[in-house]
Image (tube, rainbow, N blue to C red):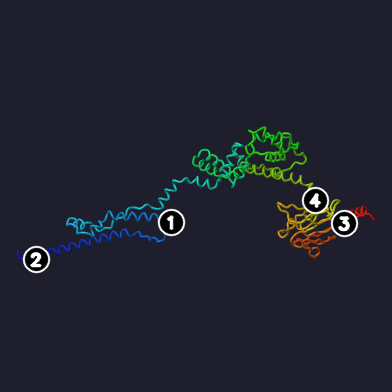
Amino acid sequence: MDKDSQGLLDSSLMASGTASRSEDEESLAGQKRASSQALGTIPKRRSSSRFIKRKKFDDELVESSLAKSSTRVKGTSGVEPGRCSGSEPSSSEKKKVSKVPSTPIPPSPAPVPGLTKRVKKSKQPLQVTKDLGRWKPADDLLLINAVLQTNDLTSVHLGVKFSCRFTLREVQERWYALLYDPVISKLACQAMRQLHPEAIAAIQSKALFSKAEEQLLSKVGSTSQPTLETFQDLLHRHPDAFYLARTAKALQAHWQLMKQYYLLEDQTVQPLPKGDQVLNFSDYYGLKVSLPPHLTSELTVADRRQKREIRQLEQELHKWQVLVDSITGMSSPDFDNQTLAVLRGRMVRYLMRSREITLGRATKDNQIDVDLSLEGPAWKISRKQGVIKLKNNGDFFIANEGRRPIYIDGRPVLCGSKWRLSNNSVVEIASLRFVFLINQDLIALIRAEAAKITPQ
C-alpha cells in the first residue's frame, strides 16, 4: 500500500471518528435536554439574599423536598458529568450510550400534601381538643369539688355556675372523661396545676354545701342571734364535716339562706288557708299538664328567688322614707296623715314623709331617697342632684348639689344654690318635670307647733 492510499485511509477514519463523536455528543445533549424538560415541571424557587428569611408554608416545604429529590435523580440516573466533559468515552460506552432511549425519566412519586395533613390530623385526638376548648380548668375544678361534696351530677348541674351553659349530658360526659380517659385527665390535671392560688381559693369558696354540713347548720336555732364566733366554734368542733375552704362568714350566710327558706330544724312551713287556695292554669281549666323535669326544677328555682326578694323587701320596708306610687286614672289621694309633700311626675309620684330627702340617680354604690330614673331617662342627672328640706317654720327649700341646673317655675337654680318651694311649683331636672304639692293641713299643724315653742 502506497503512502497516498494510507493517507486517504487515515483521513477517512478520522472523519468517521469525528462524525461518530459528534453523533454521540448530540445524543447525549438530547438526553440531557429531555431529562431537564421532564424534571422542569417543578419550577425552581427563587432564594432570598436577605439574612432573615420568612418561614415556608406546608406546600413550599413539599416543593423544596421535591426539588432535592430531583437533584438526586439527575446525579444517579444520568451520565456522570465528569466523564462527559472529560476524556473521550470508549467504543463500548459509545454503543451503550447510543442504545439508551431518549424517553424522559419519570420523577419519583412525591407525597401529596393533603394526604400527609390528613394522616397527621387522624393521629391527634380531636375530641380532646374540642373539650379542652370548651371546658376551662376552672370548670373542671368546680366540677370535681361539687361532685365530691354532693355525689350527685344533677345537683351539680343545677347548683354550679360554670363559665358557659352545659347540659346535664355534657356534665356527665365530662365527669366520665375525667375518670376514665387518661389523655383528658392528664391534660386537665396539668391545666389545673397551672391555676393561680387566688383563683383556686375563689373556686373552692364556691363549693356546694353537702348534706352533712346543712344538717349541722340546721341545728342552730332560728330564734337565736348567732354571731361569727358561733359558727367559728362550729367549725372547730366539726373539722372533718365541713369543707376545707369554709369560713365562719360563709357558714353564717348559708345559715341565713336556710332560715329564709324555712330549712332549719325548729322551723315549720305554714300551710295555705283553705279559703285562699291559689289556682294554677291546669286547675282553672281542668287540665292535667305534665311538665318536663328540667322545666319543673327551673320554675322551682325561680319561685324561690322571687320569695327571697319579697322577704328582703319586707325587711327593708321600715327603712323607706319615700314611697313611690304609679299614677293611674284611679289613683288614691295624694296626701294622708304622714305625707308632708308630694313630688308628682307623669309616671310616678314620690311621697315625702321625712323632713329631708335626697334626689338623684340610684346606682349600686349610691342609694338615695328619690330615684328619678323611675320617671324617665335620667342619664344626664347626677347621682346626688339635690336635697329638699322642711324648715321649722313650715317652708320647703331645694338645694342643687349636681352639675346641671334645676329649674323651679322656669328659674334656674345653679350648683350650690337653693330656692324656696311653694305649692304647685314646677320642678324640672334634665327634661323631667314634676309638680311639688304641699299638704297644707299638716304643714299648718307644724307651723302652729313651732309658734308655740318659739318664745314671743
Between 222 and 1, the one nearer to me in the picture: 1
Residue under pointer 4: 321
| In this rendering, the label closer to the viewer, 2 or 3 | 2
Residue under pointer 1: 55
Q: Secondary structure at mark 3?
A: loop
Question: Image quarter for residue 207?
Answer: top right
Q: Residue furthest front?
A: 51
Q: Amino acid at mark 3?
A: Gly
Q: Amino acid at mark 4?
A: Gln
Q: Secondary structure at mark 4?
A: loop
- In primary-sequence order, the first of circles 4 and 1 is 1
- In primary-sequence order, the first of circles 1 and 2 is 2
Cα separation, mark 2 vs mark 3, equals 152 Å
Q: Amino acid at mark 2?
A: Gly
Cα separation, mark 4 vs mark 1, equals 72 Å
| In this rendering, the label closer to the viewer, 4 or 2 | 2
Above or below, 275 against 421 in this view is above
Q: Secondary structure at mark 2?
A: helix
